[in-house]
């Protein structure tokens, strides 16, 4: 491990109140926004002024028939991006029936989001302020003594000024760390750099009076044992080659910013933009058609009384006709299959699904707002994929469809399944946030294979040449006509690049069967090139209510929420935000209101019946069926061979149990507001060894390990990936092919999910 000297912290005996004030002020400065998000923000402002040679036909009034819904037929028939603008003065004003309620909604959620955002920044600052350098390095929060180089993509003439690679000292490799793709980091000089740095600091800490720079902030694009590649928010950075550098894990406020923007977008009525649009000008559909449905039950009566908020009620129809049902074929099929006893007709599409999954598809097509509860292993992802395949391949709808999930992993799983189903998904995400084997379907990959990519590259080269010419003239202070002309040319070239890039994105979005991204990325201004009337929100119970609104603000008029409020709720670290209700998802609130069509996928295919019996009884009112049994009643899945399980074999039936509890009373330790148990690590290693010894056909990737504690997970990760003693032992005992391979990427998992070893199954709240 590399070590550096840190400046001593001063004022340890200061009063708590003063320390908290310092933490809060500095925490705000530590929050960073990744570069690609800033670029997207600038791009959306530019999108609003785009004009084209051929303009898109747009409806002059709201149509209820898919046949006449010209906004959507236009994007299919016309490849030229229409001129799009935001409707001026579209926000509701005082006196509107919703004005007070929307103000109360905003006043309730925004402060809770601010507390959560500040809590994350405070945790980052607390680590830097109280931990030692060695501990930060050991726990993976810091990388030191790094050399830096300018990373250029293949055939790039000049460095983009944003992307850099950081490497450990010659002959060394990075040890286990938390610098995975997509995380946010800051960089400071490694030698003598204090841990409690400010926004501005001297470039040379031995010369405090020397030049100062802002702390560069970045997002990780690529991470291996040999290199961490990042993209900085600031552009045209220059790092002195004779200095060593340090990367620190940082916090980001992008979730707060986009969720707040989504709440503000509730003030807009997309129906007004629809009416005002014409063939000459198409207004972007800001907000959602489902505003009344989403706010109709907020706040609850108890919340209204405690907060003094009035909700006079809405005219909401829980079974309102959907946009998709304007198509006669879809309306007929969805009405016949949305019951538990469907009316089957010749020519109906055959779906490889169970009855509850088919019924869920029909209900999602039939209703404008539908809730689908999916207990573990009931096929939520498969149901979504088959829904898209049915819409795009069988019914051949032309409306844009957006699927959002809470995590990148879930998005990637959906994209992989959609590809296998013969569909053409578009994966939109930050550079470095898309799984490598799915990059072919990413927006960036589609851009690079677009027919206009060469033209775009030539325009960028032209802009580089113009900047070089201007740089040669500017130092001489010339104010000649030539300087003015070059500046005009630069402005014109930038405009050409913006228009061409947006046109390319528009064509790529339109060509996709479905667009897939996370809830947060759905707020990226690149989505401004198109409206999304149909939205599927997966993992809906894991996302906060404000975050769930983000994908809906592109003119959503048909929404399906898929999740399970009996599983993981949104992760909230702030006690104030938790108490205020930020941990309650939109999915859970709408489920509790009982106003909208709801169905539970009732057959699980993941667990042995003896495992599923507990959640079925305690969480699903015994409604969860087992798809892991034969007609005879025998279980399809059988437990692995294990000396631990064999000792508990039933004397009456000879059956080996599928669930086993191993009790120990070893003490826990607290690490970074979480918990770890060192002795439990040894128990897990013994169980792994037993499973691999007793089951020669089993490999390390067939075993999954779950812990609710972040600190315990990191300790397990280090032990399995980087501890040389354990690595040597497992490889010597089982061979490299069966043992846990040493880490080759920060995102490579050591195990699969065939068998689960669950640790501390009753986590302490907030750990």
Image (cartoon, rainbow, N blue to C red):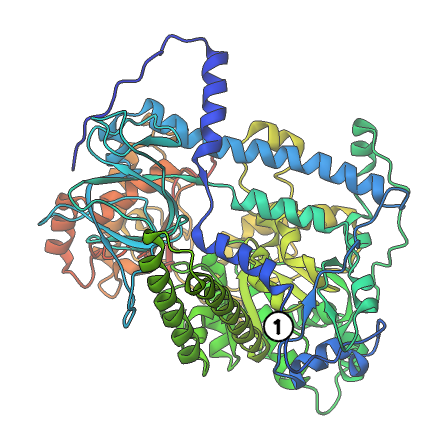
Q: Where residue 396 sits in the image (x, y, percent)? A: 66, 84
**Residue pictured at 66% horizontal, 83% vertical:** 54
Residue 316 can be seen in this image: yes
**Residue pictured at 34% horizontal, 25% vertical:** 196
Q: Is residue 665 above or below residue 441?
A: above
Lateral position of residue 194 relative to residue 660, left or right: left
Q: Where residue 370 sits in the image (x, y, percent)? A: 73, 61
Report how many numbered discs are placed on residues in the image.
1
Rendered image quadrant of residue 145:
top left
Q: Quadrant of the N terminus?
A: top left
**Residue pictured at 30% horizontal, 25% vertical:** 131
Lateral position of residue 159 relative to residue 654, left or right: left
Q: Nearer the viewer, residue 387 or 27?
A: 27
Q: Is residue 575 above or below residue 355?
A: above
Q: Residue furthest bottom?
A: 346
Rendered image quadrant of residue 760:
top left
On the image, numbered disc 1 is attached to which residue? Answer: 354
Lateral position of residue 352 relative to residue 459, left or right: right
Residue 607 can be seen in this image: no
Secondary structure beneath label 1: loop
Q: Nearer the viewer, residue 578 or 133?
A: 133
**Residue pictured at 62% horizontal, 72% vertical:** 354
Q: Nearer the viewer, residue 397 or 97?
A: 97
Q: Where residue 554 sits in the image (x, y, percent)? A: 68, 61
The 10 Å Cα crowd at callout 1, few under 14, some 14 to 19, many 20 or more, is some
Q: Where residue 223 sits in the image (x, y, percent)? A: 28, 54
């Amino acid at each position: 491990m590399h070590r550096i000297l840190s400046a001593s912290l001063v004022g340890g005996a200061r009063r708590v109140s003063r320390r908290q004030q310092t933490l809060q002020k500095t925490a705000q400065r530590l929050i960073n926004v990744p570069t690609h998000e800033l670029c997207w923000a600038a791009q959306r402002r530019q999108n609003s002024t785009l004009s084209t040679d051929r303009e898109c036909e747009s409806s002059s009034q709201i149509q209820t028939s898919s046949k006449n819904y010209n906004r959507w037929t236009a994007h299919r028939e016309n490849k030229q991006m229409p001129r799009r603008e935001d409707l001026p003065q579209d926000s509701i004003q005082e006196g509107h029936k919703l004005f007070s309620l929307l103000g109360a909604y905003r006043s309730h959620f925004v402060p809770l989001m601010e507390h959560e955002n500040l809590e994350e920044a405070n945790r980052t600052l607390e680590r830097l302020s109280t931990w030692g350098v060695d501990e930060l390095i050991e726990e993976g929060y810091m990388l030191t003594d790094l050399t830096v180089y300018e990373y250029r993509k293949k055939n790039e003439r000049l460095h983009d000024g944003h992307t850099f690679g950081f490497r450990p000292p010659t002959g060394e490799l990075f040890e286990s760390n938390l610098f995975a793709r997509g995380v946010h980091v800051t960089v400071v000089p490694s030698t003598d750099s204090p841990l409690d740095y400010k926004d501005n600091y001297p470039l040379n800490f031995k010369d405090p009076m020397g030049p100062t720079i802002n702390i560069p902030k970045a997002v990780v694009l690529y991470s291996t044992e040999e290199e961490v590649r990042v993209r900085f928010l600031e552009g045209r950075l220059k790092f002195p080659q004779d200095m060593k550098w340090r990367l620190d894990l940082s916090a980001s406020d992008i979730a707060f910013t986009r969720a707040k923007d989504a709440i503000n977008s509730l003030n807009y009525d997309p129906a007004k933009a629809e009416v005002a649009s014409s063939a000459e000008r198409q207004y972007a559909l800001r907000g959602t058609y489902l505003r009344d449905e989403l706010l109709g039950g907020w706040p609850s009566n108890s919340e209204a009384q405690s907060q003094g908020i009035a909700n006079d009620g809405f005219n909401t129809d829980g079974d309102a006709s959907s946009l998709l049902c304007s198509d006669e074929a879809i309306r007929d099929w969805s009405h016949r299959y949305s019951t538990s006893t469907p009316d089957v007709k010749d020519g109906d599409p055959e779906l490889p699904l169970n009855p509850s999954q088919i019924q869920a598809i029909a209900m999602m097509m039939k209703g404008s707002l539908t809730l689908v509860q999916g207990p573990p292993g009931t096929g939520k992802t498969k149901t979504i994929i088959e829904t898209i395949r049915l819409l795009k391949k069988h019914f051949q709808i032309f409306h844009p469809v957006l699927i959002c999930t809470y995590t990148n992993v879930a998005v990637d799983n959906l994209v992989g399944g959609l590809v296998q189903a013969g569909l053409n998904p578009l994966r939109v995400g930050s550079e470095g946030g898309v799984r490598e084997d799915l990059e072919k379907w990413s927006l960036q990959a589609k851009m690079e294979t677009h027919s206009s990519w060469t033209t775009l590259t030539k325009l960028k080269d032209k802009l580089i040449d113009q900047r070089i010419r201007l740089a040669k003239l500017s130092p001489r202070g010339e104010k000649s006509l030539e300087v003015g002309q070059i500046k005009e040319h630069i402005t014109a070239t930038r405009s050409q690049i913006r228009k061409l890039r947006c046109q390319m994105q528009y064509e790529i979005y339109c060509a996709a069967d479905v667009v897939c991204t996370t809830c947060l990325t759905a707020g990226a201004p690149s989505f401004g090139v198109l409206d999304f009337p149909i939205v599927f929100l997966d993992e809906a119970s894991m996302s906060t209510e404000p975050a769930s609104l983000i994908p809906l603000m592109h003119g959503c008029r048909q929404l399906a929420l898929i999740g399970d409020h009996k599983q993981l709720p949104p992760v909230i670290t702030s006690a104030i935000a938790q108490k205020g209700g930020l941990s309650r998802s939109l999915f859970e609130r709408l489920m509790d209101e009982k106003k909208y069509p709801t169905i539970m996928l009732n057959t699980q295919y993941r667990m042995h019946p003896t495992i599923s019996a507990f959640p079925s009884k305690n969480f699903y009112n015994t409604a969860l069926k087992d798809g892991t049994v034969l007609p005879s009643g025998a279980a399809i899945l059988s437990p692995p061979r294990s000396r631990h399980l064999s000792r508990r074999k039933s004397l009456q039936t000879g059956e080996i149990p599928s669930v086993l509890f191993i009790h120990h009373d070893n003490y826990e330790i607290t690490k970074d507001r979480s918990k770890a148990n060192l002795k439990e690590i040894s128990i897990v290693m013994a169980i792994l060894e037993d499973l691999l010894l007793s089951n020669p056909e089993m490999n390390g990737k067939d075993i999954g390990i779950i812990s609710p504690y972040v600190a315990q997970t990191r300790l397990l990760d280090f032990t399995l990936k980087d501890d040389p003693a354990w690595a040597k032992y497992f490889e010597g005992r089982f061979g490299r092919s069966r043992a846990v391979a040493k880490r080759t990427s920060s995102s490579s998992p050591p195990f699969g999910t065939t068998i689960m070893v669950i640790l501390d199954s009753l986590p302490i709240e907030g750990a």
